[in-house]
Image (cartoon, coloured by chain):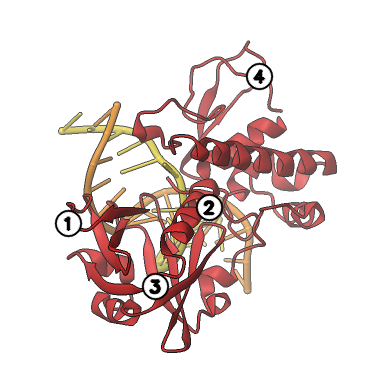
Chain colours: A red, B yellow, C orange
Amino acid sequence: MPELPEVEFARRCLARWTGGRRILRVEFDSRAGRIFRPAAPALVAKGLTGARVKSVGRIGKHLLVRLEKGGASLGLLSHLGMTGKWLRSGAGLDPPSHSRARLFLDDGKILHYQDPRLFGRLRMVPGARFEEVREVAALGPDPLPGIDRSRLAAALSRTRLPIKVKLLDQSLLPGVGNIHAAEACFRARIHPGRPSHELSLSEVGRLADGVLASFRSALEAEKGPGITYLEEGGANPFLVYGREGENCPRCRREEIRRIVQAGRSTFFCPRCQR
DNA sequence: ACCCGTGTTCGCTG
DNA sequence: TCAGCGAACACGGG
């Protein structure tokens, strides 16, 4: 369920697990071709074998792993798609289900890239020049630790798209996904259907605050049991997402509604959000 | 069985 | 030319 907070959590885990470690061996499953495409899985595996991890970065929902092999820099770009996850296990344990690739580290641990739906991507970036990768080049500046409000206001003034739909555009505030777009509109008390160019400067400011607050709240939840995934059985940690029919947590007088915008669900309070 | 889904890209349309 | 839309990708869960 990766939007920015989950990807940032994955980054911290990966950094802790791999810092200074060497990759001894790489395995992949029969479906890994989708994840690695257009490169052949065997080529990626060969490229990673023997490399040492230097650092793990992130921009938006993209993980940027910097490695070194034979004195040369090497990059691994990881996008988790809808269901991608990095997990770690000890040697000799059964791999988790849908483990598409496994990296065997020199401390005896195994990193698994798990991705049931195969929407994620894992690709090598020569020289770790991530900025030359088209999807990365198209991203706006990462919203953490802060958002440039003038830039945000300027970008919003140029489109009539509903604000909640525009928030999904990764050139705006990369890392915002369907959940946090709805959460940010709710926190900002802005109706998700409002044309972006109509927002006042103070509304744009509230929206930036809303995005950051929603991210921080989710990151805070990750520190606990690491559960912010709706499917994982924990309580729904969100204010409006997935809460159709429940009372609004702010006004307590209106039920949360669900609408569909650009083919995606949006949840909002019709009383609080105008 | 049917519907829904945390993301992105591509092709079509007006 | 291009913003905007819907479909497609693929699979599990309710």
**Placement of A242 over or under C10, stated as above or below:** above
Quarter location, residue C2: bottom right
Amino acid on which the number 3 mark rests in the picture: Arg
The residue mark sitting in front, 1 or 3, is: 1
Q: Mark 3 sits on what residue?
A: A123
Asked if disc 4 and disc 2 are in contact, CB closer than 8 Å, the reply is no
Asked if labels 3 and 1 touch by Cβ distance under 8 angstroms, the answer is: no
Real-space Cα distance between discs 2 and 3? Answer: 19 Å
Secondary structure state at the residue bearing disc 1: loop
Q: Nearer the viewer, mark 2 or mark 1?
A: 1
Marked residue chain, label 3? A
Give the residue at mark 1: A92
Q: Residue at the location (34% across, 53% down)?
A: A87
Picture coordinates of residue A111 (x, y %)?
32, 60
Marking on residue A250: 4
Specify few, some or many for label 2: CA neighbours under 10 Å numbering under 14, 14-19, or 20 or more.
many
